[in-house]
Image (spheres, rainbow, N blue to C red):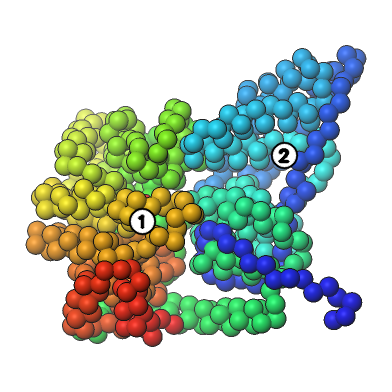
Amino acid sequence: MSDKEIKEEIRLNGIGASPGICIGKAYLVDKEGVDVVEKYFIDKQNLDNELKRFKTAVKQAVNDLKKIIENIPKEVRNHTGIIETHVALLKDRKIYDKTIETIKNERVNAEWALKKVVTGIKVMFESINDPYLKERSNDINYVSNRIMKILMGSEEVNIAKIDKRVVLVAKDLSPADTSQIQLDKIMGFITDRGGRASHTGIIARTLEIPAVLGLGNATKIINNDDTVIIDGSTGIVIVNPSEQTLNEYKEIETREEEHKAHLSFESCFKAETIDGFRLPVMGNIELPEEVASVLNHGGDGIGLYRTEFQYLTRNDFPTEEELFDNYKKVVESIAPKPVTIRTLDINGDKAVASSNGMDEPNPALGLRAIRYCLERPEIFITQLKAILRAAAFGNVRILFPMISSIDEIHETKKYLNEAADLLEKEQKAYNKNIPFGIMIEVPSTVIMADVMADEADFFSIGTNDLIQYTLAIDRVNMGVAHLYHPLHPAILRMIKHVAYIGNKKGIKVSVCGEMAGDPLNVPVLLGLGIDELSMNPQSIPAVKNMIRSLKMEDLKQFTKEILIRTTTGEVIKIVEASFGNLIG
Ligand code: PEP
Ligand code: MG
């Protein structure tokens, strides 16, 4: 021990994007980056050579990406789209032509010209408070880095060639990087940038690899071969853990694995309370590839198919045919179990391509979800047609996000009828008789639930947004994250009211926000009168297990007790005291 340096344990907090614990050695990708670029002037006689050097580098970058597309494993084939976007971006006029112009006009080296052009674009993008453009700025970063590395002769780390079990640590992982991951080598992801809705987050969840993203400066703190612990559920990363921390987490890891194995074994059993109350437990998905995960974890169907991701990874809008193929695939692969397809919920925390410079100061309160769709009927009708067509192939329900007034329901129905009429004229097979649901995520809709219930076949409470809009807490602002809690008494009263109205009016009420995936919230939701739950697929086994441990009869007194509490802390205390012992 004496000559071995003892490194200090460091704890970092990021965004838990894919649950699970992993302990392993760090492997830094792109640590050096290409931040230091030299500037030098090019003589007139060498200008053609310099231009050729740039063009050859771009050509090589294009070929490299094309090779990656050809070799993509089938699990993540759906992600070739974004790599194709990167190929297109390599030749984009804003980068390619502008760099050539700068080399010629300023007689500077290609690296410097490229850096100047890219910095200009990034400054412009980043000054606009639009998450979509911010994400595109990452794409530009990525492709310019690729060209830069070729120009500078530095080596690109080839993720496909990693030959030991490691935890990947990167500033960001591009879709081209993540698509090359071999499951037997990569134990987890840690990145400086990105969030739950980033590609890395989605792929990590699809592949069930623990991931903590958005750490800010993890690549500056973590060194190659450092031991790291990832806790993908809490978003904690521990670097150089002490002997004691390591042992603690090894124990947690073993316990979680045993618990997971036990729960998965039982996940095929139905979710029924001891006194015979049966409740569907469904999965939330973002990609067709996740259907398998819902089925493997014992889901009774898909309670929320978030369709926006097909729009986020490209620069144009998907066609009816593309959407239809995608939805049909999901509907057929889960049939006869149901799929709730939610229409486009964009802007807010997820912005869409071609949003035409919509530079909203307050996107969560802006032209988001149904509001966006009603403003862009051509985009809305294209999606509605695709959903109605896919509904001819299985058990489909349609769900509309962020409804805040009855007028929006009327207008939505008008477009749904229009979509059906068009399909009739075009003689395409479709099914219009599908349950029409609205998301309850805006306080006005809770208050108007009785009126809304006369217009809808079901309600789905989106607690992620209901909490945001009720408690005035931006769900992506880490600074107020500590105030964001589903067990806030105001939220409980709202859920109770909606469940009561649903019951009185004879329509089912489900909860599909993150709240539903925490087993400790399950007795609360059941007690409040919720009929169905939908959550990320990995949470299904633990939630089903909790339901099987409960008695509806016992929940009556418990529910009365939590509803008279006035603070979140008091509610949590009662919930933990009553059901904490049932958590593995
Ligand atoms: C919600 O708001 O709870 C929800 C399920 O929708 P999203 O997280 O996609 O906004
Ligand atoms: Mg929502």
> Dividing the image into 4 quarters, which one contains the C terminus?
bottom left
Q: Is residue 81 above or below residue 395?
A: above
Q: Residue at x 18, y 59 (%)?
A: 498
**Image quarter for residue 415?**
top left
Assess disc 2: are there few (<14), some (14-19) or many (≥20) residues with their C-alpha within 10 Å of its C-alpha.
many
Q: Amino acid at mark 1?
A: Asn
Q: Is residue 7 above or below residue 360?
A: below
Q: Secondary structure at mark 2?
A: helix
Question: Which residue in the rendered view is the most extreme toward the front?
Answer: 566
Q: Answer yes or no: is residue 208 visible.
A: no
Q: Residue at x 40, y 60 (%)?
A: 483
Q: Residue at x 57, y 78 (%)?
A: 253
Q: For disc 1, does the CB lie below 8 Å from ligand 1?
A: yes
Q: Report whether 435 appears left or right of 229.
A: left
Q: Amino acid at mark 2?
A: Arg
**Marking on residue 146:** 2
